[in-house]
Image: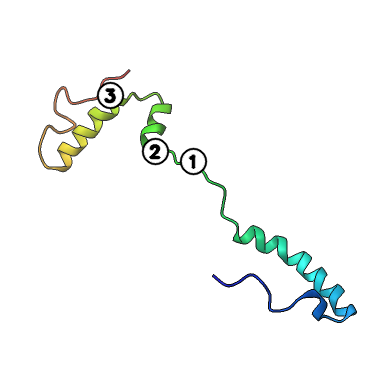
């Protein structure tokens, strides 16, 4: 990261330029600060939390995940096999 300290000081400028310099710095500094500061932390919502908020129990989620894993692995019962449908809570 670059050193944020400029290679010059305010007294290095003549009186007319000093006023302009301070005006520009006063305008740029807040913009740079907001650009360089980290974004506020946003909480991460997991898929499980979303399903739980929708009223789907952890048990029902686990049953669904086991069945999908089994199907993706090429084994187990398919979704149209009797008794394979999820029960409503």
Which of marks 1 and 3 precedes in the sequence?
1
Q: Nearer the viewer, mark 3 or mark 1?
A: 1
| Element marked by disc 2 | loop
Quick one: label 3, few (<14), some, or many (20+) residues within 10 Å?
few
Q: Circle 2 is placed at which residue position?
A: 46
| Rendering coords of residue 54 (x, y %) | 42, 27
Judge whether 42 appears above or below 54 on screen. Answer: below
Q: CA distance from mark 1 to mark 2?
A: 10 Å
Q: Which mark is residue 87?
A: none
Q: Is residue 80 left or right of residue 22?
A: left
Q: Is residue 61 left or right of residue 16?
A: left
Q: Is residue 59 left or right of residue 32?
A: left
Q: Nearer the viewer, residue 38 or 73?
A: 38
Q: Nearer the viewer, residue 89 or 37?
A: 37
Q: Quadrant of residue 26?
A: bottom right
Residue depicted at x 10% and y 38%: 75
Q: CA distance from mark 3 to mark 2?
A: 16 Å
Q: Circle 1 is placed at which residue position?
A: 43
Residue depicted at x 85% and y 76%: 18
Residue depicted at x 31% and y 26%: 58
Q: Are marks 1 and 2 in contact (CB under 8 Å)?
A: no
Judge whether 72 appears above or below 27 on screen. Answer: above
Q: Nearer the viewer, mark 1 or mark 2?
A: 1
Q: Quadrant of residue 51?
A: top left
Q: Circle 3 is placed at which residue position?
A: 59
Judge whether 6 appears above or below 28 on screen. Answer: below
């Amino acid at each position: 990261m670059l050193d944020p300290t400029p290679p010059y000081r305010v007294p290095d400028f003549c009186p007319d330029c000093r006023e302009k310099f301070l005006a520009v710095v006063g305008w740029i500094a807040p913009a740079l600060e907001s650009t360089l500061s980290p974004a506020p932390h946003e909480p991460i919502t997991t898929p499980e939390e979303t399903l739980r908020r929708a009223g789907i129990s952890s048990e029902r989620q686990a049953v669904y995940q086991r069945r999908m894993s089994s199907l993706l692995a090429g084994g187990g019962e398919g979704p149209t096999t009797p008794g394979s449908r999820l029960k409503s809570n």
